[in-house]
């Protein structure tokens, strides 16, 4: 079920999809997009309108750094799939998954790789 927005993109491989997912969910990208966002009552808005104003390289299967990001994203999928999410709000469920990724160490590894890919965030 889709609430009000759906974004999709065709990729040439599962590794390219994982690479893109890791970038789009990274704190490093969020920090670069945040200054472009308008603010709502409580939080920045419209991440989706600005995310592609931040340049990042297209996936290159021959690039070891890109492959490392894809491999880490695959590990994150495994960790996330093992989380028993509580029957509560999506925010609580999201926190449970994030906590598991942090506890595993894969979140920090992905964040470091993406930060290196995107360069300084401030």
Image (cartoon, helix red, strand yellow):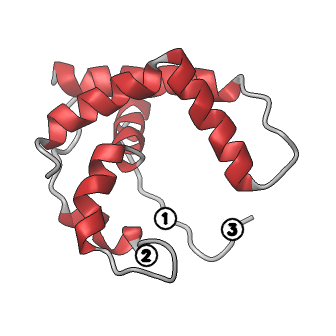
On the rendered image, what quadrant is the N terminus found in?
A: bottom right
Residue 104: image location, x then y, percent: 54, 16
Q: Residues within 10 Å of mark 3 (few under 14, many from 20)?
A: few
x and y, in percent, of residue 89 in the image: 78, 55
The Cα atoms of the two marked residues, 3 and 1, are separated by 10 Å
Horizontal side of residue 25 vs 53, given as left or right: right
Q: Mark 1 = which residue?
A: 7
10 to 19, vertically: above or below = below
Precedes in sequence: disc 3 or disc 1: 3
Label 2 vs label 3: CA separation?
Answer: 19 Å
114 w.r.t. 20: above or below: above
The residue furthest front is 42
Q: Position of residue 20 (x, y in %)?
A: 35, 43
Name the disc covering residue 2, or none: 3
Q: Earlier in the sequence, mark 2 or mark 1?
A: 1
Q: Which mark is residue 45?
A: 2
Alpha carbon distance from label 2 to label 1: 16 Å
- Mark 1 lies on a secondary structure that is loop
Q: Quadrant of residue 12?
A: top left
């Amino acid at each position: 079920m889709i609430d009000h927005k759906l974004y999709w993109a065709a990729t040439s491989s599962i590794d390219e999809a994982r690479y893109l997912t890791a970038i789009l969910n990274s704190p490093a990208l969020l920090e670069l997009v945040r200054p472009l966002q308008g603010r709502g009552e409580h939080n920045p808005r419209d991440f989706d309108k600005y995310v592609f104003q931040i340049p990042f390289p297209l996936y290159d299967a021959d690039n070891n750094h890109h492959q490392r990001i894809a491999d880490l994203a695959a590990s994150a999928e495994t960790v996330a799939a093992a989380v028993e999410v509580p029957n509560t709000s999506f925010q609580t469920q999201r926190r449970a998954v994030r906590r598991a990724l942090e506890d595993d160490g894969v979140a920090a590894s992905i964040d470091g790789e993406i930060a290196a890919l995107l360069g300084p965030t401030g």
